[in-house]
Image: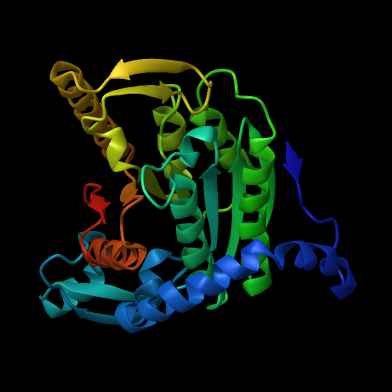
Amino acid sequence: MKSWWPSRRPAANDERPALEAAAGGAERALRRLEWTVIRRLDGLLQGDYRTLMRGTGLDLADLREYQHHDDVRHIDWNVTARLQTPHVRVFTEDREMAAWFVLDLSRSVDFGSGVKAKREVSAGFVGVIARLLTRHGNRVGALVYGNDVEAVIPPRTGRRHVLYLLDAMERRSHRKERQPAQKGMTRLADLLKSAAMLMPRRSTVFVVSDFLSEPGWDRPLAQLVQRHEVVAVRLFDPLELEIPDLGLVPLTDAETGEQLWVDTHDAGFRKRFAHLAAERETQLRETLAKAGVDTLELSTQDDLVQAIVRFADMRKRRVRATGSSPSKAVAA
């Protein structure tokens, strides 16, 4: 596993090679996101970026009368007994908190039946969220998974760091094209366990994956939730849920390279495929909800702007709600 944890703060000259590497595709991708997505979000979110990531420190700001849906844990019992009316403490939240992107870049995320692949959707989401957070002084880092946990990018702030992160994702994609197919499915459990070990302080963690993995990742995810605020960003393509009538076509396992010819003209096959896909959808959503994570579902055909706006709205409602409300899945 490769890691870029610095032993000292790099000088300006030390950053030049990284900047030169990021000046190509990553620079173009980030500029496109800034013009087509972030500019639109600036007019729609209206400060709601703050609900995308919550801090850990709380300072007492005020006292007010208890209202419906207030968290009962914030009731000040001394004031309540003295005034004979329930009062709650109002806190100002500290914003100093790092965000981590736990990135599944295995071969299955290269799939896409339309213009975009799941990998491009992942890069777009990471670029937008990272830029929204870093331009307000927050730090972002990443764990990159291919055949294994291949890179750890420590959290930093600034546009240059977002470029470096996007460039790392792009380099992983190019390197994957020259590698043989991996043996077996993605081991998402290994990625989540590594994330738990490498994040000592409480952080906001975005797990960006299609969750096509060997079973057993649910327990490491639940353990990650115990320390961190975790958001599952689930990538999918509509063709993974239902196959149209295309005749005799080859289906290839993106991760192992195994190929199988199927007759999609067979209505019975299409029905069985849709049934199994629906069962997996239900099981996946139940597993994520049981782990206690917010879920954003991103299709390869979705509008990224509307997806993030709806996600921010859902997060805002949860912040206002009481304590531990059940997790919800947000489809763009």
Check the image and report above or below for 75 versus 119. Answer: below
From the viewer's side, name the closer residue of 311 and 54: 311
The residue shown at (41%, 30%) is 212
The residue shown at (64%, 62%) is 25
Q: Position of residue 193 (x, y in %)?
A: 55, 33
The residue shown at (23%, 49%) is 328
Location of the C terminus (image quadrant): bottom left
Check the image and report above or below for 97 versus 290. Answer: below
The part of the image, by quadrant, that contains residue 195 is top right
Q: Position of residue 118 (x, y in %)?
A: 43, 46
Residue 1 visible here:
yes
The residue shown at (47%, 34%) is 108
From the viewer's side, name the closer residue of 46 and 259: 259
Check the image and report above or below for 211 versus 297. Answer: above
The part of the image, by quadrant, that contains residue 83 is bottom left
On the picture, is 103 further left or further right than 7?
left
On the picture, is 214 further left or further right than 150?
left
